[in-house]
C-alpha cells in the first residue's frame, strides 16, 4: 500500500511533507522548517511522528528538528557527509543507503549542487521523490556550494527515475520559476499549459511544489539544457549540456 502524504506549508514559502505507512502506522516528516504547522498537521491527522528525514543543512529545512525530536522522540535520518552541520543523527546516511518507513523503504540519492551534502529520498513503491532544493517545481536550487557540473549530474540522476514519480520540492517558487521558464523557453506549449494550471492552483490556494517527473522534463528549463532547440535559441548551439545548464542557471541568478 502506498504511503499517505500531507503537504505542509511552512514559513514563507517552504514545504514539509508528512508520510504515513498505512500498514505499520509509522509517520515521517521530510524537513522541518518550523514546528507549529507540523504539530498541527499531526494532530489534525491523528498521526504519531516516528521519523524525521533531512535533505540538507539549511536552516529553513532543519530549524525545527531539535524541538520536534525532543517532543516526539522521532529518529533523525540525514547525510553522514553533513553530520557536522546537521542536528544529531540517529541514522547517518550514505548515497545508496535506504531509509525504512514501516513496510516501505526509500533510496538515498546524492544530489549535490545547492549544497554539497544535499540528498534526496526516493520511495519507488509510492512513486514519490523528495528533492527539496535540488530539482524544484519548474526550477532548481541556487548553486551555493556545488558547481554547475555537480548540479547537472544531480538533475540527471533524478531524471533517471520513473516518469510517473511525483517530485516533491522544498519551496513554492512557482511565481518566479514560472516567469523565468517562460522567458527562456517561450515557445514551449507544455510549459504554457502548466503555467495556466498553476495560475488556477495559486488562485485556489493549492500547493504547487509537487509535479510528476514527466511534467518537469517537459517544462522545467533546467531539465531541458540538453535540448538542441533551446541551445540554438540561446545562441549556444554545439555547447555541452553542462555549459547550457550553467548558462541557464546564470540567467536565473540575475532574473
Ligand atoms: Zn536550501
Ligand atoms: Fe530551502
Image: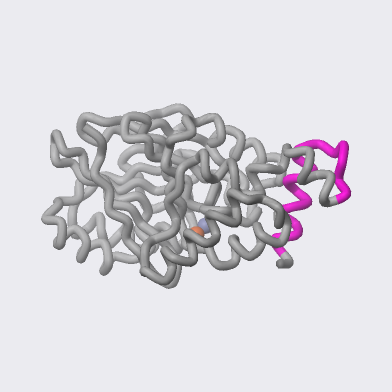
Question: Taking 175 as reference, is 230 above or below it?
Answer: above
Colour pattern: one colour
Pick whichever, 172 or 61, lies toward us. 172
Report whether residue 83 is seen. no
Report whether residue 235 is seen. yes
Question: Taking 169 as reference, is 165 above or below it?
Answer: above
User: Residue, x 53% and y 52% (percent of image)?
Assistant: 136
Give residue 82's position: percent from left, percent from top. Answer: 49, 45
73 with respect to 162 (left or right): left
User: Residue, x 35% and y 46% (percent of image)?
Assistant: 53
Give residue 193's position: percent from left, percent from top. Answer: 55, 55
Pick whichever, 103 or 227, lies toward us. 227
User: Residue, x 14% and y 52% (percent of image)?
Assistant: 47
> Magenta span covers which residues?
235-253
The N terminus: image quadrant: top left
Q: Residue furthest left?
A: 46
The C terminus: image quadrant: bottom right
User: Residue, x 59% and y 38% (percent of image)?
Assistant: 154
75 with respect to 183 (left or right): left
In the rendered structure, does residue 58 fall within the stretch colored magenta? Answer: no
Give residue 225's position: percent from left, percent from top. Answer: 71, 42
Amino acid at each position: 500500500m502506498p504511503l499517505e502524504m500531507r503537504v505542509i506549508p511552512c514559513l514563507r514559502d517552504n514545504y514539509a511533507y508528512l508520510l504515513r505507512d498505512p500498514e505499520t502506522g509509522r509517520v515521517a516528516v521530510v524537513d522541518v522548517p518550523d514546528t507549529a504547522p507540523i504539530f498541527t498537521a499531526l494532530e489534525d491527522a491523528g498521526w504519531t511522528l516516528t521519523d524525521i528525514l533531512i535533505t540538507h543543512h539549511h536552516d529553513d529545512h532543519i530549524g525545527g528538528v531539535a524541538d520536534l525530536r525532543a517532543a516526539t522522540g522521532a529518529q533523525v535520518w540525514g547525510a553522514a557527509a553533513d553530520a557536522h552541520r546537521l542536528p544529531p543523527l540517529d541514522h547517518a546516511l550514505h548515497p545508496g543507503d535506504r531509509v525504512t518507513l514501516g513496510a516501505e523503504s526509500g533510496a538515498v540519492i546524492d544530489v549535490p549542487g545547492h549544497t554539497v551534502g544535499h540528498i534526496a529520498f526516493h520511495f519507488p513503491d509510492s512513486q514519490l521523490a523528495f528533492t527539496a532544493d535540488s530539482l524544484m517545481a519548474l526550477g532548481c536550487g541556487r548553486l551555493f556550494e556545488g558547481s554547475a557540473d555537480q548540479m547537472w549530474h544531480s538533475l540527471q540522476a533524478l531524471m533517471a527515475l520513473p516518469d510517473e514519480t511525483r517530485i516533491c520540492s522544498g519551496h513554492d517558487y512557482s511565481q518566479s520559476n514560472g516567469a523565468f521558464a517562460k522567458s527562456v523557453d517561450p515557445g514551449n506549449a507544455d510549459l504554457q499549459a502548466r503555467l495556466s494550471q498553476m495560475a488556477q492552483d495559486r488562485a485556489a490556494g493549492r500547493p504547487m511544489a509537487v509535479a510528476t517527473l514527466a511534467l518537469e522534463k517537459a517544462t522545467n528549463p533546467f531539465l531541458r539544457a540538453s535540448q538542441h532547440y533551446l541551445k540554438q535559441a540561446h545562441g549556444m548551439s554545439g555547447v555541452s549540456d553542462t555549459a547550457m545548464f550553467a548558462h541557464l542557471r546564470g540567467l536565473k541568478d540575475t532574473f
